[in-house]
Image (tube, rainbow, N blue to C red):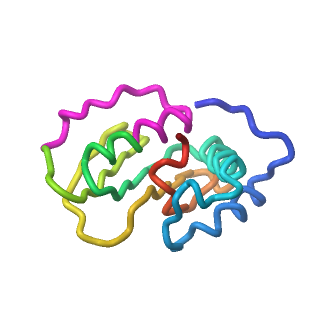
Amino acid sequence: MSSSQPANLSIEAAQQTLEAFTCAEIQSINQIKNRDSICAALQLLVQNSEYQMLGICADSLDAAWNALEQYLQKLGYNITINRNAVEAIEGSVYLKFNGRSQSYYASPYTEKYRGVLVSCQSTDETGVNGTYGHFPLDLFT
């Protein structure tokens, strides 16, 4: 993953920027006025953690795969997704990606939330640890 950081953005400022999304109702990307700031903050926190886990709640498996591919690309992953690696699921799904093992699984999902949770993981106490989101499925489009 890339190690470049946006100028003038600290880890603390990035975390504050993303606090608005913690346990908040999901907003459409069209309603987000500071989209670039949110993307930059999320990218900075990812760059300062060892690995990430993404949890995607979507109306369909296809929508979840699309969101995962967009997020992974923008967060600096160079991975090819094998959409056939999980069994097809009809209806709403939860798709989880583990950045450490670069594996994923899907299961039916009946809750109301839609969006992406990003959990940053670090074993070093100076690294970023925290869960952020739900972010819009289309944050990086």
* 102 relative to 71 in the view: left or right: left
* 84 relative to 64 in the view: left or right: left
The image position of residue 128, as x and y in percent, is: 63, 54
At x 27%, y 43%, the residue is 62
Q: Is residue 94 above or below residue 7?
A: below
The image position of residue 10, as x and y in percent, is: 80, 52
At x 29%, y 72%, the residue is 111
Name the quadrant of the N terminus.
top right
* Residue 73 part of the magenta-drawn span: yes
* 89 relative to 10 in the view: left or right: left
Which segment is the magenta one?
Answer: 68-87
* 64 relative to 120 in the view: left or right: left
The image position of residue 5, as x and y in percent, is: 75, 38
99 vs 122, nearest the viewer: 99
Q: Is residue 19 above or below residue 78?
A: below
129 vs 117, nearest the viewer: 117
At x 55%, y 52%, the residue is 123
14 vs 109, nearest the viewer: 109
At x 51%, y 44%, the residue is 51
